[in-house]
Each structure stands twice: as structure tokens, then as C-alpha cells.
Image (tube, rainbow, N blue to C red):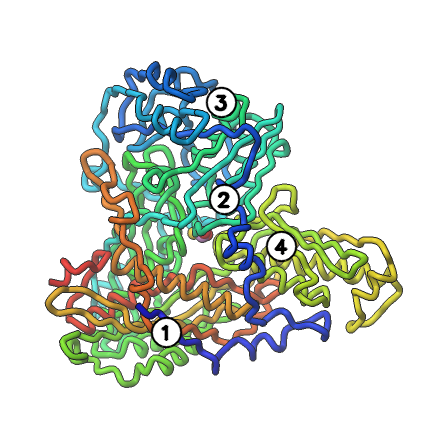
Amino acid sequence: MSTSTSTSTSTSTSTSTSTSTSTSTSTSAIGQPASRVDGRLKVTGRASYAAEFQAPNLAHAAVVRSTIARGRISAIETARAERAPGVIAVLTHRNTPRLPYRPHKGATDPAQGERLHVLQDERVHHQGQPIALVVAQTLEQAQHAASLVRATYASEPAVLDVSKAGPVLPTQEKTDQGAATPPQTRRGDPDAALAAAPRKVDQQYVIPREHHNPIELHATIAAWEGERLTLWDKTQWVHNVADEIGAVFGTPAANIRVVSPFVGGAFGSGLRTWPHVTLAALGARATGRPVKLVLSRREMYYGTGYRPHTVQRVALGASPDGRLQAIVHDGWQETSTYEEFSEALLNATRVLHSCPNVSTRHRIARLSVHTPTYMRAPGEASGVFALECAMDELAAQLGIDPVELRLRNEPQRDEFRNLPFSSRATREAYRLAAERFGWSRRNPATGSMRDGRWLIGWGMATATYPMNFAPASARARLLPDGTAEVSTASSDMGPGTWTSMTQVAAETLGLPMDRVRFMLGDTRLPRAPVHGGSMTMASVGSAVQAACRKVRQDALARAGIGGDIADVGEAMRRLGRPVEATESAAPDEQSKGFSKHAFGAVFVEVAVDPDLGETRVRRMVGAYGAGRVINPKLARSQCIGGMIGGIGMALMEHSVVDGRNGRMPNANLAEYAVPVHADAPPVMEVIFVPEEDPHLNPLGVKGLGEIAMVGVAPAILNAIHHATGRRIRQLPATPDKLL
Ligand code: MOS
């Protein structure tokens, strides 16, 4: 199946990046569509992922998991497992030392509640909870012995059905950088305005639980040397792993080294430090040997978080000419009994469209499940789905073009925080994407466009994601041979951080890219924030730029060479010894006076088979105003990945939860459907709206990782309505719902 894609060129980023402030005219690495500097390592198998590191005398671990969702372990029989070939240790709550589990809440941990304590007592809080760990000489021996462990339980009624969940409680929305908004927000008088509005949409939108399915399985190798611990781990935040495991074991985080140079996909599954990391460290401590623990695909469904199931009510009130008069957006989501995970579900509704009367109310249902987590565009992907489907319903009811309806409600400023937007590219995004898509040729009547027997539908939606920026630090070291080493403890789960940081460093240093060696993914490197929230380039990139600027200035000054076009390579040869600088970057005060978000629009063509109910996405055009683009090739890949992820959300992804016991019968890649190449449309276009925004960060970037996921599912569902006249308000839009 061909998946050839076409690239936009006429609206590429070159116009916005050519004016970038460069410290040297000899190179302009920023803005170049450079290929990945680590690409060769990856395709030749020389990039080592967590499970691929070697430690001498390595033992292997397997986890035994609960088969009930709630209750107590009344007995656990391990004798057969202990006698099995190759077994070194079997740990259960009966023989595992009590761990300190000191309080620790990193930015990506839920604000309320307490993390799961593994093998500390007989309580079972969720299906698939670890109840024993087997360590053996080989993986097969560990897995076999794990199958011999027998547990009996005193089951208690598990609450897995939301309708029986008891009170749905207010929850404070929290982003993956820790910022929070109250459970309920209100401006104007939304209830009265909704009641009085001449035109209304009032609907419920349901998104099922969706699971992270990165290709690389979560894995940890733990090795103790006395009080010092090394963890090779799949993570989006090495320092947070050290902090968390340090707190769990009562060991100073400084004694823990976490190594994670390559991550084979994550998008949220590696933001927290999950219980299996503790288990690997426990197994290594109990056996005195390095221990490797790799979760199976099935185990990932019970151990690394997921996008929570959400139910949302969106009510829109409008005048006949399409001016929004009221928005009421209520959402609730699932969480565990032991932690209150609460994503930014209603964040976008407060700023996306102009409206004098808006209320948002976010609530949470505590179920006998394990704690959900952030998953690509956490909050926005779900909340904007409901809002942008409702906007399409309103447009259809009013007989107004969906783009025109949005233009009529384009806000002048952030009406929630009452701040000016630092920049807002919605109008340009609608215009450029609509032009490229050919939106003006759309016949608004549903079911009016056909290709043979296929029903054709065109739909669109708005996308947005906040610009995040957290303090970060980086080190730059210039060497006498005129090369540089630049490093920071960031991560690269796939967007191309290795490469884009090399570009920032090369440009700032005034060196060609091949003279810069960039390194990340090790707690020995300068501290960086979580690699998430689309903020790595804003945060870590700014730190890399600052360190490179400083080391260049120092080198030139020491060599007695001045001027912007001075040759730093020549300076280093003259100096004959290394020069090093470590610098930090953090948001400045002035930027707090602005509301900072990336904005975009996505347009989609679907074809629906009228007999089989199958939906194929045929074309997608996304336009994004995300500030400066460091590498248009990587940025485009990033956006295409998000857009294809959105196809999964719209049409396929659904973690089926058995309401009797919390098991997920489709906890595997055979039955949990994700888009493959054959599902990706033959035409995918990404347009970067030129945007120069001086209020963001030193690099002028907004981040692209998450916004590309936002708006895709509603655009597809809106297109399905255009094709068929059917409103599907419950994801995913599988064929059964269209017949
Ligand atoms: Mo993203 S959900 O912050 O990895």
C-alpha cells in the first residue's frame, strides 16, 4: 500500500527562520531540514535502548500480577516457583523489606493521592497489580517460575462501572508541567445565556480509555553497587526516575544514575516512574545482581498508564448569525482509588473561541483501576474533540460554513485570563489549510459528495496547545580541535531532539553541525525538565543556546578574537585547551503578561463505505502556527505522526475494560487497533504558518509535539457527518456505529 506523502513548500518555514538571530554568518543550522544525526545509529541497531544494555552477571525478572481488581491476597504460594530451575529469588509482600516510600511528587505525578506501593502489603487496588517478582538466571526461567506462583484472594466488590462509581468529585485540572486550574471556572452567566440563546447544541461526547503503545516496551535494568544504583530505563525524564526511586528506597537521588539515551516512542508513558522500576531495583537488591525487567505488551496495559475514559457534555448557545453566547463544558474522567490523576481536559475551551458566558466543570470518578496518565496532548486531545464536534453541529444547524463560524468567534485576547495572546495564528491556519485543501469546493449538503459508491466527507477542526517552558540547563564544551560537546539530561522519545539540539548548538557556536556532538539521557548531565508537554525545544533548546553562546564568547575573549563573524574553531586552535560553560534558561517575567499557545487547523477528507461502514481517511491538511521551526523535516514528521495518531483516536483505539474484573481483553497489538501504513492517507500536508513571537523564549518556539494530535479526531468525525449525515459522538467511529 502506497503511503507516499507530499510536502508543502510554498508556505514552508523558511521565511520565518531566515530572519533568526544568528551568532554567526558562517552557518545557519537552524531552519535546515537536517536528517537525524542519530539516524544511522538507529537503523544499524547501534542505538541502545533500555533493555539492550549489558551488565555483568545479569539476572532476569518476571512479574506476577493480580487476577482480581480489588481485595486482599489471603494466601500466596511460592514454594514451587522457588524450586524451579534457575530461580534466584521470589519476592512477595511477605518477604520484601518495607520500603520508606518517602513523599515525592514530581510535576507529572498526580497532585492528590499516594502512588502504588509494590509488594508492601496484601492489598489489591487494581487488576494486574504486581503481587510477586521472580528473579532467575534467564528470562524463560523467570517467566516459567512466575507461572507457578499461586495466589488466593479475598475479593471485594470492584467499582469499574462509572454509573456505580458513587459521587463524581470535583478535580483540579493539572498539566504535565504541574500547573493547575480550579475544578470549576465561570465567566458571565452561562446558564442564563444558554437558556436565552436562540440556537443551541447540547450533546454528550464519550471517549473510551486509550492505551500507550510505543513500539519499545518499557524496560529497566537495575544494578546496585553498595548504596549506589544505576538504572538503564525507558523514560522521558531521567532525573525524575532518580528522584522517585531515591524517595522509594530512602536513598539520596545523587546516588542514583539513570541512563536513557534512546527511547523508542513514549508520548506520556515515560513521564512518570512506574512500579516496575521499583521492582527491578528491589530484585537487584534482593539478589545482589543486576536485574533486567522488560514488561510485555500485555503488561504495559496494566502498568504504564493510559488516556482516561472521558464523558463530556458540551452545550453551545448562539445567535442565528453564529455568535457564541454561551459555552457550558462539563467533563468527567476516570482515575484510580489511590491517586487523583486529572488532565487539562477543559483547558482549551476557556480560550479557543470568543464567548462572554463560559462555564467549565471537571469531575472525576474513582474506580478500581490503575492510575491513568498523560497521553499525547493530554486533556486537549479529549476536550477539543468534544468542543470542535459541537462547533460543527452548531455550524450545520445554522447553515454556516464551519470555518466561517469559527472566524465569527475569533477572540481578540485570552478571555479567561484576560491577557493578550503572544501570537495567535488561527486565521492564517484556517486560510492556508483551507486553500491547500480546496475547501471552497465543498458542497455543504451531507451525503452530497461521492466517489463511485464511497460517500465523501470533508471536515475540519481547530487545534491548540499551550506553550510550555520550564527551567532547564545545558553544558557546552569547546575543544582545541575546533569541535564541541553539548549536553543536557533531556530525552528524545522520537521527535528528533538529538538532531534539533545539534542544530541550535551549531548555529549558536558558529560551527558546522558535524563538528558538534550532542548528548542527552543521563542524570550525570545538566538537569532538564520532563521531555513532554511540547516544551523540550522551548526549555532545553533555550538552555543549549545559552550555554553555547556563553562558551563561544568565553573562547573568543580568551583567544583575543572579537566580532560576530569570528571563527571559534580558530580561537580554539589558538587557545589549545578546552573551554566549558554551563547555563540555565527559565521563563522571564515579561512573558507572564501574555497567553501563550500554539494554534492550528486541520482539514480532512474521508470516504465512508455505505455498505460496510468502513471509514478511510483520504487526505489531511494541517496548518500550525507554532513559532519558529528549528527543523522543518523533523517538525513535519512530528506533525504527521500526530495526525496519524488522531486517526487512531477517531477510528480505532479503544481499551476494552471488562466491567466484572477490570481486565482488558484486547491488551495486545492484534486486537487494540492502531493505524498502520495502510491506514495513513496517501496525501498528508503540513503547513507551518510563519510566526515570529518575541514573547515566548529565546528561540521563539512554541512546540509541535502535541498540537498535531489535537483537532484531528473531531475533524474526522465532522467529515464522517458530512459524508453520511450521521453524528457519531462516541469514539472510536468503528463500522458498527455507521451501519
Ligand atoms: Mo507528552 S503526554 O507530555 O509526553
Tell me residue 652's x, y (percent): 26, 56
What amino acid does circle 3 point to?
Answer: Leu
Give me the C-alpha separation between circle 1 and circle 2.
32 Å
Residue 578 vs 403, above or below: the answer is above
The disc, 2 or 4, on the residue closer to the chain's N-terminal end is 2
Question: Which residue is the site of mark 3?
Answer: 99
Give me the C-alpha separation between circle 4 and circle 1.
34 Å
**SS class, disc 4:** loop
The disc, 4 or 3, on the residue closer to the chain's N-terminal end is 3
Question: Which residue is the site of mark 1?
Answer: 621
Give me the C-alpha separation between circle 2 and circle 4.
23 Å
How crowded pointer 3 is (Cα within 10 Å; few <14, some 14-19, many 20+) is rated as some
What amino acid does circle 4 point to?
Answer: Ala
Tell me residue 537's x, y (percent): 56, 59
Give me the C-alpha separation between circle 4 and circle 3.
35 Å
Quadrant holding the N terminus: bottom left
Q: Which mark is residue 586?
A: 4
Question: Which residue is the site of mark 2?
Answer: 235
